[in-house]
Image (cartoon, rainbow, N blue to C red):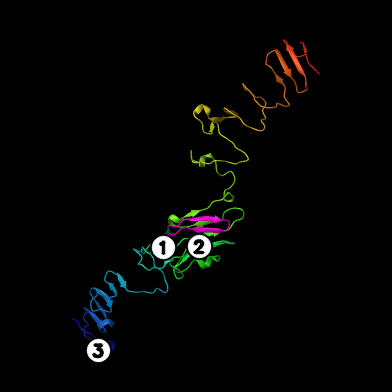
């Protein structure tokens, strides 16, 4: 049984049923209104704005699945639901993103970035021009604001300005004194951080954290160098020519130094202009000539000092 009724007719019909005790049969369908302002309900579900549930922009089928062209939720919560995708044009700040530009410090108070693309989770892309912070004197936030520019990153020293609807915080920069500015970049290829010596806690980097053959430098300047049980230094034609430090022994083919302090020096030849403050002897045996630090030349002919012939010239 199909029929159309308005509100007044429905009220009158219910009153008649109540008064006369008529048997009220189950409705197979219900239609209220006409054309695009119609509400309909039948065994398929309930829908609005169309004579056919398939083309209706607002509908709820019998399984509980609801479809609406637009909906505003003013309270409550959504639980146990999943989002299968974001339509193009969704708010930037609720999406994942990446930036392909690369950040670097230009000097003590300027951070710069190369041109690159911001790519959003919904597939939207913004091509960003190369730029820099200019001279900064405080912590500076580098961000993208769709409402201001589609190609230029913005900067501010107010943190709250860099976030909000259709904004993305890309990086944070800080000026330094006597060294390059520091920065922290977020997201994708553009991610990076400039780490300075002040950011490294003393004694936290040891040989365990440094991969073999990973340090390549012309110079290492340090107040102290502590080595392991077997260390090779320098480049040579063969392994035998490499300077090695094993324990407390340095083995090398050549030493060039302003001063050498040692309890003992064993060498086949010592060349130089002057040897000062030491005894010099011709051999380690009992027969020898010794030039002493007391400006004496002593001649030994066997035996030990004090029992043998001493010759010296004053």
For label 3, the residue is 16
* Disc 2 residue crowd, few under 14, some 14–19, many 20+, Cα 10 Å: many
Q: Give the alpha-carbon distance from disc 3 to disc 1, as whole Å.
A: 71 Å
Comparing 294 with 31, the one in front is 294
Query: Can residue 59 be seen in this snapshot?
Result: yes
Q: Main secondary structure of the magenta part?
A: strand
3 or 2: mark nearer the eye: 2
Q: Nearer the viewer, residue 42 or 262?
A: 262
Marks 3,2: beta carbons within 8 A: no
Query: Badge 3, how many Cα within 10 Å: few under 14, some, many 20+?
Result: few
* Residue 108 shown in magenta: yes
290 over 151 or under it: above or below? above
The location of residue 213, given as percent across then percent down, is: 48, 38
SS state under label 2: strand
Q: Residue 76: percent from the left, percent from the top?
A: 42, 71
- Residue bearing mark 1: 127
State the separation of the CA atoms marked 3 and 2: 73 Å
Give the residues drawn in magenta, as a range. Answer: 100-118
Residue with the mark numbered 2: 142
Q: Nearer the viewer, mark 3 or mark 1?
A: 1
Report the residue that reaches farthest toward the left.
1
Disc nearer the start of the sequence (2/1): 1
- Depth check: 157 or 273 in front? 273
Under tag 1, what secondary structure? strand
């Amino acid at each position: 049984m199909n029929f159309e009724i308005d509100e007044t007719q429905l009220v009158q019909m219910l009153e008649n049923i109540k008064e006369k005790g008529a048997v009220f049969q189950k409705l197979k369908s219900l239609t209220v209104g006409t054309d695009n302002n119609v509400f309909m309900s039948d065994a398929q579900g309930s829908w609005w704005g169309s004579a056919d549930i398939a083309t209706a922009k607002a509908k709820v089928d019998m399984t509980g699945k609801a479809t609406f062209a637009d909906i505003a939720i003013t309270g409550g919560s959504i639980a146990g639901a999943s989002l299968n995708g974001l339509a193009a044009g969704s708010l930037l700040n609720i999406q994942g993103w990446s930036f392909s530009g690369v950040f670097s410090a230009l000097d003590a108070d300027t951070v710069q970035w190369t041109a690159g693309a911001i790519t959003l989770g919904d597939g939207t892309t913004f091509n960003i021009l190369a730029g820099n912070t200019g001279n900064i004197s405080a912590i500076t936030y580098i961000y993208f604001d769709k409402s201001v520019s589609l190609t230029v990153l913005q900067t501010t020293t107010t943190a709250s300005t860099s976030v909000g609807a259709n904004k993305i915080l890309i990086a944070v920069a800080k000026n330094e004194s006597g060294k390059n500015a520091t920065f922290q970049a977020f997201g994708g290829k553009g991610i990076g951080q400039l780490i300075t010596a002040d950011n490294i806690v003393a004694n936290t980097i040891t040989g365990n954290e440094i991969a073999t053959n990973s340090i390549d430098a012309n110079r290492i300047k340090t107040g102290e160098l502590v080595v392991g049980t077997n260390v090779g230094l320098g480049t040579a034609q063969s392994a035998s020519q490499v300077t090695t430090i094993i324990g407390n022994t340095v083995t090398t083919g050549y030493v060039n130094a302003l001063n050498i302090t040692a309890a003992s020096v064993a060498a086949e030849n010592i060349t130089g202009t002057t040897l000062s403050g030491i005894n010099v002897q011709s051999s380690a045996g009992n027969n020898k000539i010794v030039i002493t630090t007391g400006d004496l030349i002593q001649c030994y002919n066997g035996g030990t000092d004090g029992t043998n012939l001493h010759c010296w010239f004053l």
